[in-house]
Image (cartoon, grey):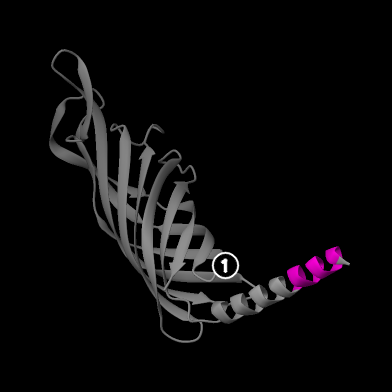
């Protein structure tokens, strides 16, 4: 009899929590998202790691405006660059469409425009054969605007916390300038190459709702 009473109380507790969570989950989803990323290998870059942060501002029932910042660091040892490391900063603004399905599933898609800041770095030897990583001074990438499209899904696990899985395709063409030849000799005039740095990255992270 006692076991039956405990089971009844447990069931009632679960039902009450479910109702409270459903009410909480029906709020407007405004939040701050922190995420970690990995880029898939491209013709120019190997896999890399990074992170970022974004904020969602509710506009209408399913439409949000999302400013974001993210960065990536990656190896450049695919023959495209003389410099060893690549670092990219991306400041963007997106329109996001998000809908709720089931109890706590929120698939979404956003698209927008952003500005790329690039930096190439290289290992150099400074006195006593000490190797350090410094900004590359013989090769550079031009900064500029690009586009992105981002499908993803969120899973709400508490009234204030969501888990995210995102796939993001970034589209960007730029120019690469090199100031030395293949032997390391300084050139009187930089050699300029058109370069497609579009690639796909996977992100995961958390969203805090407020």
Near-viewer residue (50 or 11): 11
Q: Nearer the viewer, residue 108 or 25?
A: 25
Q: Residues within 10 Å of mark 1 (few under 14, many from 20)?
A: many
Q: Which residue is mark 1?
A: 156
Q: Residue at x 17, y 40 (%)?
A: 190
Q: Nearer the viewer, residue 56 or 75?
A: 56
Q: Main secondary structure of the magenta part?
A: helix
Name the element at disc 1: strand
Q: Is residue 4 magenta?
A: yes
Residue 9 lies, in percent from the top left, at: 75, 71
Q: Is residue 25 above or below residue 53?
A: below
Residue 61 located left or right of residue 173: right
- Which stretch did the figure color magenta? 2-11
Q: List the single residue furthest toward the right.
A: 1
Q: Quadrant of the N terminus?
A: bottom right
Question: From what the image shows, is residue 203 above or below residue 28?
Answer: above
Describe residue 107's horizontal placement relative to residue 33 as left or right.
right
Asked if the magenta segment contains residue 57, the reply would be no
Quarter holding the C terminus is: bottom left
Question: Measured along the vertical axis of the image, is residue 2 above or below residue 177?
Answer: below
Q: Is residue 14 left or right of residue 175?
A: right
| Vertical position of residue 134 compared to residue 65: above or below | above
Instruction: Please tell me which residue is depicted at 57% across the width and 67% down the height of the picture.
Output: 156
Which residue occupies 25% across, 44% down?
119
**Looking at the rendering, which quadrant does residue 139 occupy?**
top left
Can residue 178 be spotted in the picture?
A: no
Is any atom of residue 207 visible in this view?
A: yes
Instruction: Point out residue 96 in the picture as x, y percentages from the top left corner.
Output: 46, 74
């Amino acid at each position: 009899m006692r076991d039956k009473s405990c089971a009844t109380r447990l069931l009632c507790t679960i039902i009450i929590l479910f109702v409270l969570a459903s009410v909480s989950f029906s709020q407007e989803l405004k939040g701050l998202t922190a995420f970690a990323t990995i880029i898939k290998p491209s013709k120019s870059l190997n896999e890399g790691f990074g992170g970022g942060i974004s904020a969602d501002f509710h506009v209408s029932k399913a439409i949000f405006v999302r400013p974001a910042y993210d960065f990536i660091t990656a190896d450049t040892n695919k023959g495209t660059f003389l410099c060893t490391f690549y670092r990219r900063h991306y400041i963007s603004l997106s329109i996001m469409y998000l809908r709720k399905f089931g109890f706590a599933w929120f698939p979404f898609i956003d698209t927008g425009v952003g500005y790329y800041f690039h930096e190439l770095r290289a290992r150099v030897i400074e006195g006593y054969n000490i190797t350090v990583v410094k900004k590359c001074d013989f090769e550079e990438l031009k900064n500029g605007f690009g586009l992105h499209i981002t499908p993803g899904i969120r899973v709400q696990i508490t009234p204030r916390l969501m888990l995210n899985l995102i796939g993001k395709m970034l589209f960007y063409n730029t120019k690469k300038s090199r100031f030395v030849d293949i032997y390391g000799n300084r050139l009187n005039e930089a050699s300029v190459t058109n370069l497609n740095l579009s690639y796909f990255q996977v992100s995961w992270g958390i969203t805090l709702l407020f």
